[in-house]
Image (cartoon, rainbow, N blue to C red):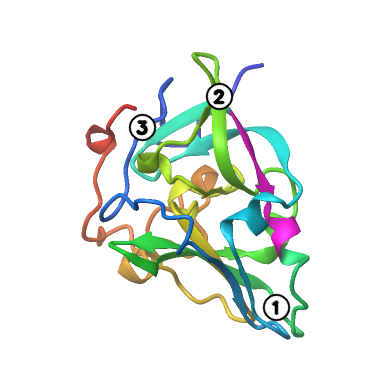
Amino acid sequence: MTKTLPPGQIETKKWPILHEGDVYQFDEETWRFKLFGEVEQEVTLTYKEVMALPKVVNTVDMHCVTTCSKFDTTFEGIPFRELMKLVNLKPNVRYVRIYGYLNGDPFGYSANLPLEALQGDDALFVYRWKDAENDWQDISPKHGYPLRFIPPAQFYLWKGSKWASGIEFMTENNPGYWEVRGYHMNGNPFKEERFADRNNLPSGYGGADEWKDL
């Protein structure tokens, strides 16, 4: 089936690496995943508890704001909706921030997303992958091991937090790490929602030459 590239994107066959800060070194003894915010009671999970949740396999397309797109990567992971089942949401929750480690801080990185868009098999906390050139393997530390969020294809990949550490449930659409630095609040690649202000590029923005192949 012919794939459609979003405007301004270039197809890549490999899964490039681009991230902010240091690569997190996983320690199962200290690693925790927190569900908090507008919930009746916060929940904190160990790695074993997270990995015991129901899992799915799904093939997705990924689009990075730096202009690269990779089609047809297959992931195994835990659907967002399975984690959401573990908490009772307060009224009017419409958004989330998904957190990840940044330079040792488990909540140093975050990305905001609408809750409604995350209920399918294409919103996954992933831990292994394959594609046409690679058999099943764990995601590498540089790709976000032990757990990385992969958003639906209607969002740029900066919305997919590496080294995922928690979900904050919100009634307001509060910005995440890159959004407060000038990136678009929605981040739809098919609408080229890269920046809040197209005439004022955020600090740290780079093009496809910043990608590093796996």
Q: Label 1: which residue? A: 93
Q: Nearer the viewer, residue 12 or 23?
A: 23
**At numbered mark 1, what does the secondary structure look like: helix, strand or loop?**
loop
Give the Cα separation between the discs numbered 1 and 2.
34 Å
Q: x and y percent of residue 41 in the render?
A: 70, 84
Q: Nearer the viewer, residue 15 or 164?
A: 164
- Against 136, residue 181 (above or below) is below
Judge whether residue 75 is colored magenta.
Answer: yes
Q: Is residue 186 left or right of residue 64?
A: right
Q: x and y percent of residue 114 in the render?
A: 63, 64
Q: Is residue 180 left or right of residue 212?
A: right
Q: Label 3: which residue? A: 16
Give the Cα separation between the discs numbered 2 and 3.
14 Å
Q: How many marks?
A: 3
Q: Amino acid at mark 3?
A: Pro
Q: Amino acid at mark 2?
A: Lys
Front label number (2 vs 3):
2
The boundaries of the magenta stretch are 74-83
- Against 70, residue 95 (above or below) is below
- The extreme front residue here reads 29
Point out which mark residue 182 bears.
none
Q: In percent of the image, x 59 and y 69: which residue is there?
A: 96
Q: In percent of the image, x 54 and y 15: which residue is there?
A: 132
Q: x and y percent of residue 65 in the render?
A: 39, 45
Neighbor class of circle 3 (other Cα within 10 Å; few <14, some 14-19, many 20+) is: some
